[in-house]
Image (tube, rainbow, N blue to C red):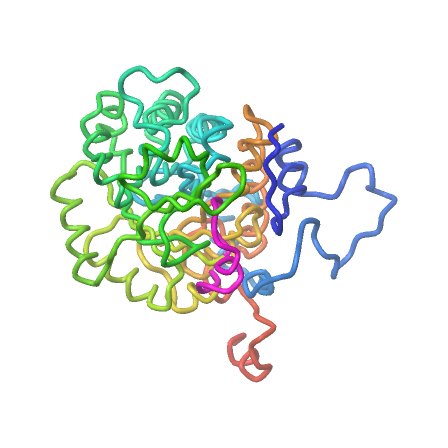
Amino acid sequence: MSDITAPGFPEEEVRRRARLGAAAAFPPPGEYGQVLYGGGRVPAGSGAPDALDALRLVPPVFMPGRLARLVELGHEPTYRDVDLEVTVGGFHSALPLYLSALGSTRAAGDRGLGLALSRQAGVMGVPLVIGENVTSVHGYGRGGDAPGDSSVLARLVAYAETAPEGRGGVVVQQSTEDADAEVWNLAYSDPAAQPLLDSGRLAFELKAGQGAKPGLGGMTVLPEAAAERMREHFVVDPLFEGRRVLRSGSPGTLTEEILRQQIRLMRNNYPRARVWVKLPPGRDVADAARLAVAAGADAVTVDGAEGGTGWAPEVFLGQVGLPLAECLRRLGGPLPGLLVSGGMWEGGRAVKCLALGATAVGLGRAALLAVAEDPRQGLARLVECLALEMRLLISALGKYRPDVLGPEDLWSPSVPPSNRLDSSR
């Protein structure tokens, strides 16, 4: 078990799921017949609820969708009859889920968790994003890196070797600094990536920002000696004791025209790869998302202010960027290829995002904690529990596919009572 921690995140509940799998969706079985559970109980792991947590999923009494499924199946449907398979950014996925970008941070790199995560994601066929600046910190991997390293190529190969045919895909981010190393060119021409490319399971993601520190580039803390070779491409500040320094990447510059042209260049230069765009929780996030889709992006990832796995200034963590719920409100409904992330770890929050227009949700800290708990099976067990909760919740709403969820499945305590009456009709 790794020593990484995640303050403010339901770490213990995520680790329990990584150990127990689907059984962790329920109270301990030893309490059955002894403990009386009922409505109003605060779920384990819940902290201070945000606007997304405050929403409730509300099944109707009359369920024509269930009747249609009954006729289709020839028997009364159950939660097992929910089909979670969806297309995530051009990839066929067994469930509406992807693994958010884990970049060059020590948590994902030095401990080998990034590689363990790649293997488990591959086995499940869940799309995986390899984050920015991995090449500049851990290397691309061409030229004989030792097995077990954290390079881009090692993570890509670990995924490709374990992924089932036709399922999942790998997404490679490229930052401003990565562009100097031509990471996308390396991956596009690499023989190891050809099986993914030939099967339409390779994508490149243009990162326009991130949830934990919108407006800033990637940041890591490094030993002073290790940072020396990076001074050419990064800002290096000697802020800390113990001969450690802060390494900061450029956030890059975007305007509407630059974003449009960047997507056009990706389409032209890498015609066999999918195009993903990652947006920060900025005030104009809806405009940027619509522009990216109109310009030809296969997926637009919106990272809410609750997101992030890496190093960020504390003033950003609590005071900068829109919460994910507000991002979804501004987006105003379904958008082709919309993916969202920010505090995901259990089924309720995920299904609410799907009802608000997302195609899939991304795991970040929860995925890292799961592989930290068990590098061989932790992520698979966490996803097993998440999938069961999604099936239970979606079937309870009288629906049997994620893409038919909608705002009618949600109730908000913040809506005035008169409007609640209107919306219930």
**In terms of secondary structure, what is the magenta stretch mainly?**
loop
Q: Position of residue 81 (x, y in %)?
A: 52, 42
Evaluate whether residue 173 shows in this view.
yes
In depth, the one of 188 and 108 nearer the eye is 108
Residue at (50, 35) in percent of width and height:
107
Residue at (35, 43) in percent of width and height:
87
Up/down of 77 relative to 119, above or below: below
| Residue at far right of view | 34
In depth, the one of 10 and 402 nearer the eye is 10
State left or right for residue 205 relative to residue 242: left
| Residue at far bottom of view | 418
State left or right for residue 318 relative to residue 134: right
Evaluate whether residue 58 shows in this view.
no
Tell me the quadrant of the picture where the N terminus can be found: top right
For the magenta stretch, what is the residue range?
306-324
Q: Residue 330 colored magenta?
A: no
Q: Position of residue 326 (x, y in %)?
A: 46, 67
State left or right for residue 118 relative to residue 30: left
In depth, the one of 236 and 422 nearer the eye is 236
Q: Position of residue 36 (x, y in %)?
A: 84, 51
Residue at (57, 64) in percent of width and height:
55
Q: Residue 316 colored magenta?
A: yes
Q: Quadrant of residue 203?
A: top left
Q: Position of residue 265 (x, y in %)?
A: 14, 47
